[in-house]
Amino acid sequence: MSFEDKSLQCADCGATFTFSGEEQEFFATKGYTNEPKRCPNCRQARKTTRNGSQGGYGGSSSGGYRSSTSRQMFPATCAQCGKATEVPFEPRGDRPVYCSQCYNKTRVTGRR
Ligand SMILES: [Zn+2]
Ligand SMILES: [Zn+2]
């Protein structure tokens, strides 16, 4: 059985389009018995809109990342001048904590 080009009318836009013999053969091998109801343009448009609205994954998951927006500051006492200050890391006993002023100073003087 050979396939001949057919003229079909698009159900969406009403345009006449060709259901070519090749396509019919393709349809037959896929086991499709239905003729295409839409012209290639509308088929393409449908595909893209479907994909566009399909993004059901993720989207608005309330993320666990809140890193840089509000950096936690820890209260500390400056080892240099004794002033109360805040540092962006948790102060531990093994390291002296400086206020920003003294930190800058020690950086400058510490460089040799
Ligand atoms: Zn169409
Ligand atoms: Zn200080």
Image: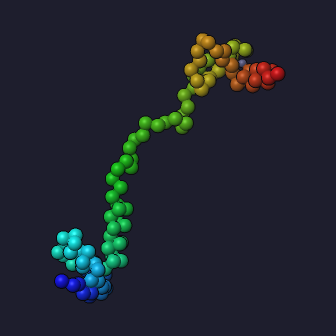
Q: Residue at x 70, y 25 (%)?
A: 100
Q: Is residue 96 left or right of residue 72?
A: right
Q: Is residue 2 above or below residue 46?
A: below
Q: Residue at x 69, y 19 (%)?
A: 98
Q: Is residue 111 above or below residue 58?
A: above
Question: Number of marks in the image?
Answer: 0
The x and y percentages for residue 96 are 66, 15
Q: Residue furthest top?
A: 93
Q: Is residue 73 left or right of residue 34?
A: right
Q: Residue furthest right?
A: 112
Residue 50 appears anywhere in the view: yes
In which image quadrant can residue 71 be found?
Answer: top right
The x and y percentages for residue 83 are 68, 16
Residue 14 appears anywhere in the view: no
The x and y percentages for residue 81 are 73, 14
2 or 85: nearer the viewer: 2
Q: Quadrant of the C terminus?
A: top right
Q: Residue at x 21, y 84 (%)?
A: 2
The x and y percentages for residue 36 are 24, 77
Q: Residue at x 35, y 50 (%)?
A: 57
Q: Quadrant of the N terminus?
A: bottom left
In which image quadrant can residue 82 be found?
Answer: top right
